[in-house]
Image: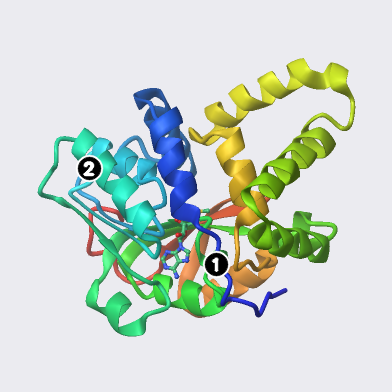
C-alpha cells in the first residue's frame, strides 16, 4: 500500500528536536535500551558495530553506545534529526567511536560507502522514505555476514483503514500550525479519550505506559503519526518472505502495534561478535 506523493515530506527532525529539549532523560535512554535488548535477546552490545538508519532523536544510538557497542554510526535524512543526535553524542561525552551524519537510505552510492555492520537498526524509518522496499533492500545490504537486522515497519495487518490515515497525513502536512494543533487535539479526543472526558486519567496512564514501552513521548509520537509522510504500510508476511529470499532468517518478531518489529539474522558464516 503505497503513497506515491513523496515530494511532500514531514519535518520529522523538528519533532525530534522538541522531544530532546522537552522530554529527554537518562531514564528514557535506559527504557529504550531495555526494549532493544529484549527484542535482540541480549544483555548488552559489547563488541558490536551498530548502524542506526534514520536515527531521529538519536536516543537509540545513545542507548546502543551505552550498551557497549564497539562503534556507532547514525544517519538521517533530516538535518534537524542529525543535529538532535549530535546533542545525544555530546551528552555521551563526544566519543570517537560514534559518527553522525546526514544521509539518505535511498542513495545507493552513499549507502554502499557505509560498508557492513554487525547490527543494522532502523526503527520506524524505511516506510517513510517514499520507496519502502528499496529502502529495506539498501538497509539489508549493510548487514555483515552473520549479522543482525532489526527493523520496525508500519503494519498493514493491524490497520483497518490505511487510506483514511494516508488522507489525514496529507491534510496534516498541508495544514497551518493552528490547524495541526486542532488535528492533534482531535486525535487525542477521538482515539485516546474515545470522546469521553472522564477518561482523562486514562490519558495520564497512556503517557506513562508509552514512556515505559520504548522511552518515547506519547505526544511526540502522535505528531509523528499524524505527520509522518511519505508513508507506506506493509504486511508482516511480505517482509518475512522478502528477507528470507535475501538469506535472512526471522529470529524474533513483535506484532500487534502500529509498527511490527522484526529481528533477522544473516544465515552466512558468522564473522562478528554479533553472531
Ligand atoms: C519516525 S522517525 C524514527 C526515528 C528513530 N529511528 C526512532 O525510532 O525514534 C523516522 C526518521 O526517519 C528519517 N528518514 C526519513 N526518510 C529517510 C531517508 N530516506 N533516509 C534516512 N532517514 C530518513 C526521518 O527524518 C526521521 O528522523
Q: Is residue 234 left or right of residue 190?
A: left
Q: Which residue corresponds to the image point at 82% horizontal and 29% vertical from the top-left?
A: 193
**Which residue appears farthest toward the bottom when viewing the image?**
109
29 vs 224, nearest the viewer: 224
Question: Looking at the picture, does residue 96 appear above or below residue 195?
Answer: below
**Which x, y percent locates residue 23?**
45, 29
Task: Respond yes or no on whether mark 1 lies under 8 Å from ligand 1.
Answer: yes
Among the 4 quarters of the image, the one containing residue 154: bottom right
Of callouts 2 and 1, which one flags the residue occurring earlier in the amino acid sequence?
1
Across the whole image, how many numbered discs are drawn on residues? 2
Q: Is residue 150 left or right of residue 163?
A: left
Question: Looking at the picture, does residue 215 appear above or below residue 89?
Answer: above
**Which x, y percent locates residue 21?**
39, 33
The residue to which callout 1 is attached is: 9
Q: Which residue corresponds to the image point at 70% horizontal and 60% vertical from the top-left?
A: 169
Q: Quadrant of the N terminus?
A: bottom right
The residue to which callout 2 is attached is: 89
Whether residue 256 appears in this view of the structure is no
- How many neighbours does mark 2 have within 10 angstroms: few (below 14), some (14-19), or many (20 or more)? many
Amino acid at each position: 500500500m503505497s503513497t506515491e506523493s513523496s515530494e511532500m515530506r514531514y519535518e520529522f527532525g523538528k519533532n525530534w528536536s522538541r522531544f530532546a529539549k522537552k522530554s529527554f532523560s537518562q531514564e528514557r535512554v535506559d527504557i529504550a535500551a531495555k526494549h532493544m535488548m529484549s527484542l535482540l535477546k541480549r544483555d548488552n552490545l559489547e563488541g558490536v558495530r551498530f548502524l542506526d538508519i534514520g536515527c531521529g532523536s538519536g536516543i537509540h544510538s545513545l542507548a546502543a553506545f551505552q550498551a557497549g557497542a564497539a562503534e556507532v554510526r547514525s544517519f538521517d535524512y533530516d538535518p534537524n534529526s542529525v543535529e538532535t543526535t549530535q546533542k545525544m553524542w555530546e551528552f555521551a561525552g563526544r566519543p570517537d567511536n560514534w559518527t553522525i551524519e546526514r544521509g539518505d537510505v535511498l542513495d545507493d552510492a552513499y549507502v554502499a560507502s557505509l560498508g557492513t555492520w554487525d547490527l543494522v537498526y532502523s526503527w520506524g524509518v524505511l516506510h517513510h522514505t517514499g520507496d519502502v522496499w528499496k529502502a529495506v533492500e539498501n538497509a539489508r545490504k549493510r548487514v555483515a555476514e552473520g549479522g543482525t537486522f532489526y527493523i520496525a515497519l508500519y503494519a498493514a495487518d493491524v490497520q483497518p483503514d490505511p487510506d483514511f490515515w494516508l488522507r489525514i497525513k496529507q491534510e496534516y502536512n498541508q495544514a497551518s500550525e493552528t490547524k495541526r494543533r486542532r488535528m492533534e487535539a482531535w486525535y487525542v479526543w477521538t482515539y485516546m479519550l474515545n470522546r469521553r472526558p472522564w477518561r482523562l486519567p486514562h490519558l495520564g496512564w497512556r503517557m506513562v505506559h508509552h514512556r515505559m514501552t520504548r522511552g518515547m513521548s506519547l505526544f511526540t509520537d502522535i505528531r509523528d503519526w499524524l505527520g509522518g509522510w511519505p508513508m507506506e504500510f506493509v504486511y508482516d508476511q511480505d517482509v518475512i518472505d522478502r528477507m528470507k529470499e535475501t538469506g535472512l532468517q526471522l529470529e524474533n518478531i513483535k506484532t500487534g502495534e502500529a509498527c511490527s518489529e522484526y529481528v533477522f539474522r544473516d544465515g552466512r558464516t558468522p564473522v562478528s561478535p554479533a553472531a
